[in-house]
Image: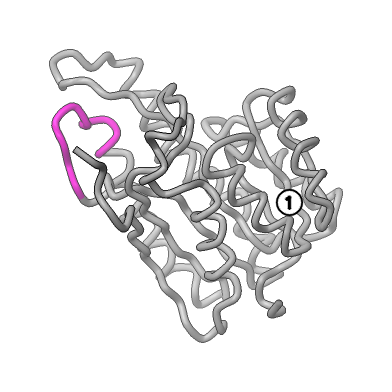
Amino acid sequence: MKKNIGKVALITGGSKGIGYGVAESLIKHGMKVAITSRSLDSAEKAAEELKKIGNGEVLAVEADVRDFKSQEKAVKKVIDTWGQLDVLVANAGVGHFAPIDELSIEDWQTTIDTNLTGVFYSMKSCIESLKKSEGYIITISSLAGTNFFAGGTAYNASKFGVTGFTQAAMLDLRKHGIKVSTIMPGSVATHFNNHEPSKEDEWKIQKEDIGELVVDLLKMNPRSLPSKIEVRPSRPAKS
């Protein structure tokens, strides 16, 4: 394991789905990992399962990415517990899908506040700590961040925003020694948008695949930066 993989990571929305898959991969590499959820109970249950992996340490944190002070408290808890922060994975997200004439103001606001403003708050709260460690920020965008679709006005807007925001932040922060990348997955077999994964989802990207990709990014030689990574299932769904 190369030194630049880091020692301490904070993963927003880490109690399930992609965030949980990333936490699994980092813990297997001996990292200390804090996972956040709006529900402390959910975070603690996920942390108990992650601790069974046995190689790293896990911290459950209650936090809402839509609340900047909540994110600041999450970062403070990580620093108070482990003394440093090396990696932020800004993963927390929601999906509300409807034609623009049917999309509610509440669903629009929730999507933008969580998926876009939440990434800004998460990154903003970590920057000073990551300057000290010359750390890594990885945001989880989506192929919906470059490919629009009917019924996706809120989701497309949020993910187009995350993709552009992350790329601009990368240019701002690399002079401080902080690496910034965005991962843009296609179809992933998770519980996103109340989906229940099944055998029919085996063709999709699996959550652990994204975890392995995060590890690969952290292992890269520090002189190289894959700033935007698109990843999709290698084969389409069977018709």
- Confirm whether the magenta stretch covers residue 53: no
Q: In the image, what residue occupies the spot 27% across and 30% down?
A: 154
Q: In the image, what residue occupies the spot 57% across and 31% down?
A: 67
Q: Main secondary structure of the magenta part?
A: loop
How many labels sit on residues? 1
Residue 64, position as x, y percentages in the image: 59, 30
Q: Is residue 232 left or right of residue 24?
A: left
Residue 220, position as x, y percentages in the image: 55, 79
Amino acid on which disc 1 is placed? Val
Q: Which quadrant would residue 151 be assigned to in this image?
A: top left
Q: Is residue 99 left or right of residue 214?
A: left
Residue 118, position as x, y percentages in the image: 49, 38
In what quadrant of the picture does the C terminus appear? top left
Q: Is residue 174 left or right of residue 162?
A: right
Secondary element under disc 1, as helix, strand or loop, is strand
User: How many neighbours does mark 1 have within 10 angstroms: few (below 14), some (14-19), or many (20 or more)?
Assistant: many
In what quadrant of the picture does the N terminus appear? bottom right
What's the image's color scheme? one colour
Q: In this view, does 101 lie to the left or right of 19?
A: left
Q: Which quadrant would residue 230 be assigned to in this image?
A: bottom left
Q: In the image, what residue occupies the spot 31% across and 55% down?
A: 164
Residue 123, position as x, y percentages in the image: 54, 51
Along the viewing direction, whichever of 8 and 112 lies nearer the viewer: 8
- Confirm whether the magenta stretch covers residue 150: yes
Name the residue beneath numbered marker 1.
Answer: 33
Q: In the image, what residue occupies the spot 72% across and 38% down?
A: 73
| Segment colored magenta | 147-156
